[in-house]
Image (cartoon, rainbow, N blue to C red):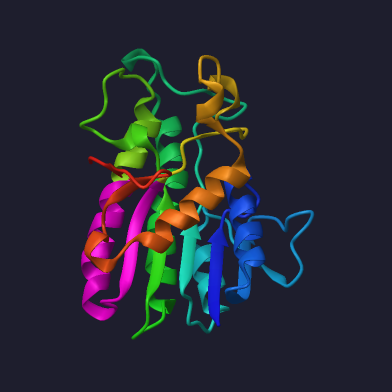
Amino acid sequence: MESALVVGANGGIGAALVAALAASGRHGRVIAAARREPDTLPAGVDYLPVDIADPASIAAAAACLDGPLTRVIVATGILHDEEAGPERSLRDLDADRLAHLFAINTIGPALALRHFAPLLAKGAPSAIACISARVGSISDNRLGGWYGYRASKAALNQIVRTAAIELARSRPQAVCVALHPGTVDTSLSKPFQRGVPADKLFTPVYSAGRLLAVLDGLTPAQSGRIFAWDGAEIAP
């Protein structure tokens, strides 16, 4: 039986991924990792404390797992919070704010790759993915703004690409990718949903199902790339 780990299990997409993985019946063990234990977890799902902003927490969580894992999804991210929203112009840039965005969107997932990728199954198909965003595509940036979010997600995409190259040497059957979930009706997108067509504003359940379907359809030859919820590849 396969084992699956979702980091960021308290977020809208993360919680939906945990539920979908548990309901699939494919996994002998599903692990929900988050800073605090979710209020409710599907039957048979284990909780693992992980603070994506705390490197020691990520390392300690990995040390608690004996593997092998066949599915790891890092579903963490930040666009805005109570203190600040996304930057609209250069004059909005702030060093501490940028550092915070990179800590959550890039450094944390990078360290999750460092510690959890070695737990992927050897000699068997496996997958590790990070939730990224289409706005992290440099070639697709036509509107500007959102400096820190765009840059931190672009950096995450490069981390994933580089990790995929290394991972292929020790686990040639593994897939390592970045995934764009679409515009999902969560707290992250809530202030920016105006103007989004109804058929393009997804529920977390729908997005999670699409992401898992995309991940299931990928091969090691596609490792290191960025894919959207509909399976389309996104240019870096």
Majority secondary structure of magenta residues:
helix
The image quarter containing residue 93 is top left
Residue pictured at 40% horizontal, 25% vertical: 94
Residue 235 in picture, x, y percent from top left = 23, 40
Q: Is residue 78 above or below residue 221?
A: above
Q: Residue at x 31, y 48 (%)?
A: 226
Residue 194, image x and y in percent?
55, 15
* Extent of the magenta region: 156-179
Does the stretch in magenta take in 56?
Answer: no
**97 vs 126: above or below:** above
Residue 80: horizontal and vertical position, in percent? Answer: 53, 29
Which residue corresponds to the image point at 41% horizontal and 59% vertical from the top-left? 215
Which of these two is toward me, 174 or 20? Answer: 20
In the rendered image, the quadrant that contains the C terminus is: top left
Q: Position of residue 128 (x, y in %)?
A: 41, 64
Q: Is residue 161 magenta?
A: yes
Q: Splitting the image into 4 quarters, where does residue 1 fall?
A: bottom right
Which residue is rendered at x = 60% and y = 32% of the image? 185
Residue 76 vertical position relative to residue 172 in the rendered view, above or below? above
